[in-house]
Image (tube, rainbow, N blue to C red):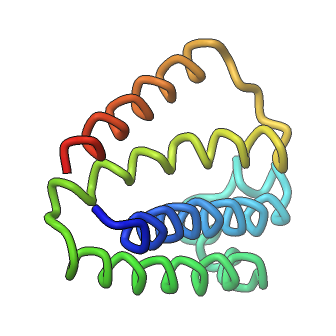
Amino acid sequence: MNVLILAFILAAVSLSALAQLFMKLGVNALGDASAQQLAAVPVILRSVQSPLVWLGLMVYVLSVGLWLYVLSKVDLTVAYPFVGLSFIVTLVFGLAFLGEQVTMPRVLGTLLIAGGCVLVARSA
């Protein structure tokens, strides 16, 4: 696998995780009580009014575009395991930007996923 393709894979995975962060920040702006008490449809309808949710969706579309390019260049069985890296990126984003609790089982599970990604990358 060449460096440019690897860069596109990492960019697509990172942008996808960034999109998730923006969408989470957007729905958090609804307030905890709203998210916990309302049924799914009202939460979704309120969420689409959030600029952060829309930003997240736009970033996600960009990540999908990059991912399509990646899929046109490498085997799916080589590219797809890198999606596991999004677990690492989202773990870091959750800790850094959302103040989420990161437990040892989460860290160990994330490291196992990362190790699998390394093994797949080395086989390409």
Residue 71 pos. (x, y %): 23, 75
Q: Hey, which residue is sitting farthest top in the picture? A: 104
Total of numbered circles in the picture? Answer: 0
Viewer-proximal residue, 40 or 69? 69
Vertically, is 117 above or below 29? above
Residue 55 pos. (x, y %): 70, 83
Vertically, is 2 above or below 62? above
Viewer-proximal residue, 78 or 86? 78
Q: Residue at x 48, y 77 (%)?
A: 63
- Position of 18 with respect to 80 (left or right) is right
Viewer-proximal residue, 5 or 81? 5
Q: Residue at x 42, y 74 (%)?
A: 4
- Position of 15 with respect to 119 (left or right) is right
Vertically, is 66 above or below 14? below
- Give the quarter of the figure containing the N terminus: bottom left
Vertically, is 48 above or below 82? below
Viewer-proximal residue, 83 or 123? 123
Q: Residue at x 72, y 68 (%)?
A: 22
Residue 47 pos. (x, y %): 68, 75
Residue 53 pos. (x, y %): 69, 76
Q: Residue at x 85, y 57 (%)?
A: 31
Q: Hey, which residue is sitting farthest front in the picture? A: 2
Which quarter of the picture shows residue 84?
Answer: top left
